[in-house]
Amino acid sequence: MKITDIRWTAAFIPIEAPLRYAYGAHSGISRVIIEVDTDEGITGLGECYSGPSREGQLREMRPQLIGEDPFQLERIRWKLSSPSMQKLFGNVLGYAGIEFALLDIQGKAIGRPVCDLLGGMVRDRIPYAGYLFYRHANERGEGAISNADEMVAYARGLVDRYGFQTLKYKNGVQHPDEEVETFQALRAEFPRHRLRLDPNAAWSLTTAVRTARKLVDSDVEYYEDPVWGLRAMERVNAKVPWMTLASNMSIFAFEDLSVAARQNIIDVVLLDPHWYGGITRARHAATVCEALGLDVGLHSGAEFGISQVAAMHLLASVPNFSAAADSHYHHLTDDILVGGKLQYEDGCMKVPRGPGLGVELDRDKLARYSELITKQEMGSWIEDPTRRGVVTVQPKW
């Protein structure tokens, strides 16, 4: 089998209401959908982050990919995205989307799901965390979340609707003291749920330590990236040793893993098949974490359904996956898959059992949502419309 072409389409799907981060806001989710064709009539599906730089990566990789055998993953990886190229030129995200498509082709060719190519399935359901954000009102004037009462009410609605047993609170938006009160309100409302918080490294070391001490009795599942950088994370872990630390920002590449373990920087590594260079590479990273005694969870970068199922196949094969996966998916109003959005059941999703990734493209929806994308909506971090011209620095507090 030989690869004959690679095509991609940028698309934008609206969400229920604009999500606020420490450094900006999202009015929707944008991604690039990748299709890799072969001479045997099999097409593989992939997905990566959107933006002109990602599409540029795909354009540069296209001539090197054509003619290759989609089963020769290591040859293709070293040809298109070796570790030195990833570090020097940052081409890992575009390549990861291609790798999803190559695994989809392999699975379709032999009639087996992608997780069987990774060592087999150790779980058939993936638990997810309900992702809580401060939000701006949508175009209908609905959906705003700006205080503890509104956050708790929204969380209650998510739990009742989807059955989540874990909640992740995205903070770094309001003053830290207000966010401590909101976390405590969530704990009072959900005494048996796992609760985690993530300020996206928006705090100084002193703020992170002070906040952790205020939450000492709040049963925090884990404290994700309260500060920026390996040394600062190490200091937080030393000063508040009762708090479990997780990271996908300071720790996000293979060379970070041994440092994280050796220097006792964190306890939970949040893997991402995009950032680690594909599903197979993220699977290898999980094995490294197992050997180093580090727990494994999953980072979410705001996915459509193709990336959602790619991560599900990854986690289905990882024995040491222990923390419910992050996902923006429940914020989406639609998807580009045949059959519409993937469904939750008791806070989990079932791993697709069809060949490859187990999903198909709805081309009418892909065409519709490709018309919505604009330059402003293609970035990962978008300027908050309520704070035009404000440059947010680190630390924010």
Image (tube, grey):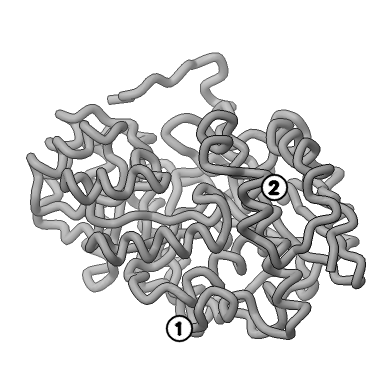
Give the camera-side residue of 240 and 385.
240
On the image, the x and y values in percent for residue 47 come to: 69, 54
Q: Which mark is residue 55?
A: none
Q: Is residue 139 visible?
A: yes
Q: Check the picture and name the quadrant holding the C terminus.
A: top left
Q: Residue at x 18, y 48 (%)?
A: 262
Left or right: residue 384 compared with residue 284: right
Instruction: State whether residue 325 is above or below residue 383.
Output: below
Graded by Cα atoms within 10 Å as few (under 14), some (14 to 19) or many (20 or more), the crowding at tag 1 reads: some
On the image, the x and y values in percent for residue 393 come to: 39, 19
Q: Check the picture and name the quadrant holding the N terminus.
A: bottom right
Give the camera-side residue of 247 and 189.
247
Left or right: residue 316 compared with residue 207: right
Q: Secondary structure at mark 2?
A: strand
Query: Are dots 1 and 2 in contact, CB under 8 Å?
Result: no
Q: Residue at x 76, y 53 (%)?
A: 33
On the image, the x and y values in percent for residue 88 come to: 54, 29
Three-letter amino acid code of the residue under disc 2: Arg
Marks counted in the figure total: 2
Three-letter amino acid code of the residue under disc 1: Arg
Q: Residue at x 79, y 57 (%)?
A: 68
Residue extending furthest front? 75
Tell me which numbered mark, 1 or 2, is placed earlier along the sequence: 2
Instruction: State whether residue 313 is above or below residue 364.
Output: below
Mark 1 and mark 2: span between their CA atoms? 28 Å
Instruction: State whether residue 30 is above or below residue 196.
Output: above
Q: Which mark is residue 123?
A: 1
Give the camera-side residue of 236 and 320.
320
Graded by Cα atoms within 10 Å as few (under 14), some (14 to 19) or many (20 or more), the crowding at tag 2 reads: many
Q: Which residue is mark 2?
A: 31
